[in-house]
């Protein structure tokens, strides 16, 4: 009997190989695809590029995917007659059309975090968010480049955080976690807005984190952007939140402010944000997420020309690394292999999404 063909997609840093290579090669033929193709369902993807996605995936019985790096809309699922199992990671994967998998009776099994550091503390995404904020505020990337290339003190002066206003679009788990940390560490005033946020809900979030009532203040959308010294995106991408932040919102922000997005790129209208940064209307931005990931080689983000003619604005970019700690990634892939073996033995599959 021929071995089961397994595709491991989009493992940029090679975490998966140590686990999938333990599989019996007589039973499983594993192929690794570390480079992501353009998303099948993105507006800019041509039919030729869509066909490339299908051609890559069509031969495989099992596919391992990492979060939303390769989306699986129903149009892709319908074109994969050999697919019998989809392995994913995290508590959710909004890139998967779960109804499409159910229609074809394809199990979708996820890997969730198993254990972690022995003491409680901020999670990986919160740590990355704070790293970006401090690096943007203190001009770390620009100063590093200046020193390495013969310069000294160049660019914008450091931006102090103490006592400033932290404005969060969304006050869920990550929004509240970053707000607590910044309030306690830098005595920042915390304001927040989302479509369903009330002061009562803001107080509940504060109380759940051991903070006093009124620590988080629910404000109007206009007030949030107008008063922000640091503006952060902390809502989940959905049909409702796609394109939520527009040029109208960004136009309200102070020039001497910091814009940060570690959630998802499409929550912000990309062209509107690019325009603001090209004009230097906002001095600092730090982004971990983008509309299309990985960034195409010709992406307008791949430039150092910001802030108009004087290049005064500073834009800090990282390649969607918020959740990418080694421990988490390795545990996810270890669990994927365990789930693959359970499937092959026709055992019950834990943590099924579909």
Image (cartoon, rainbow, N blue to C red):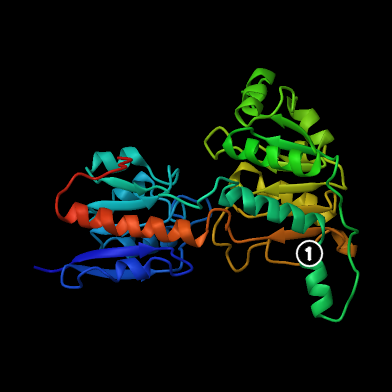
Quadrant of res 66: bottom left
- Res 46 visible: no
For disc 1, the neighbor class at 10 Å (few under 14, some 14 to 19, many from 20) is some
Q: Which residue is mark 1?
A: 140
Q: Is residue 34 left or right of residue 348?
A: right
Q: Is residue 283 left or right of residue 3?
A: right
Quadrant of res 332: bottom left
User: Label 1's element?
Assistant: helix
Q: Residue furthest top?
A: 200
Which percent across, then down, holds residue 307? 84, 58
Instruction: Name the one closer to the observer, 211 or 127.
Output: 211
Is the residue 211 above or below the residue 113 in the image?
A: above
Q: Residue furthest front?
A: 118
Q: Residue furthest bottom?
A: 150
Residue at x 55%, y 40% (from the top left corner): 237
Residue at x 66%, y 28% (from the top left corner): 206
């Amino acid at each position: 009997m021929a071995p089961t063909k397994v595709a491991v997609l989009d493992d940029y840093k090679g975490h998966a190989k140590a686990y999938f290579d333990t599989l019996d090669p007589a039973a499983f033929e594993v192929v690794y695809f570390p480079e992501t193709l353009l998303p099948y369902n993105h507006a800019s993807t041509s039919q030729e590029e869509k066909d490339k996605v299908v051609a890559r995936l069509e031969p495989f019985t099992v596919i391992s995917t990492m979060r939303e790096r390769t989306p699986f809309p129903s149009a892709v699922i319908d074109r994969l007659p050999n697919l019998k199992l989809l392995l994913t990671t995290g508590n959710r994967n909004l890139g998967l059309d779960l109804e499409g998998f159910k229609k074809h009776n394809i199990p979708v099994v996820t890997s969730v975090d198993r254990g972690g550091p022995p003491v409680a503390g901020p999670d990986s995404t919160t740590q990355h968010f704070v790293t970006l904020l401090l690096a943007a505020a203190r001009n770390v990337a620009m100063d590093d480049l200046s020193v390495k290339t013969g310069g000294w003190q160049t660019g914008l002066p450091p931006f102090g955080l103490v006592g400033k206003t932290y404005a969060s679009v969304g006050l869920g788990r990550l929004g509240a976690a970053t707000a607590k940390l910044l309030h306690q560490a830098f005595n920042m005033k915390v304001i927040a807005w989302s479509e369903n946020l009330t002061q009562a809900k803001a107080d509940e979030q504060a109380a759940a984190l051991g903070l006093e009532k009124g620590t988080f203040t629910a404000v109007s959308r206009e007030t949030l952007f107008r008063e922000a010294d640091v503006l952060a995106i902390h809502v989940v991408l959905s049909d409702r939140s796609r394109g939520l932040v527009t040029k109208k919102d960004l136009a309200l922000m102070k020039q001497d402010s910091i814009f940060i997005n570690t959630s998802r790129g499409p929550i912000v209208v990309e062209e509107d944000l690019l325009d603001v940064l090209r004009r230097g209307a906002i001095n600092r931005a730090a982004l971990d997420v983008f509309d299309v990931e990985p960034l195409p080689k010709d992406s307008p983000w791949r430039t150092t020309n910001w802030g108009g003619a004087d290049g005064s604005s500073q834009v800090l970019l990282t390649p969607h690394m918020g959740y990418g700690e080694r421990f988490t990634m390795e545990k996810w892939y270890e669990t994927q292999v365990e789930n693959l073996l359970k499937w092959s033995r026709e055992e019950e599959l834990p943590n099924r999404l579909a």
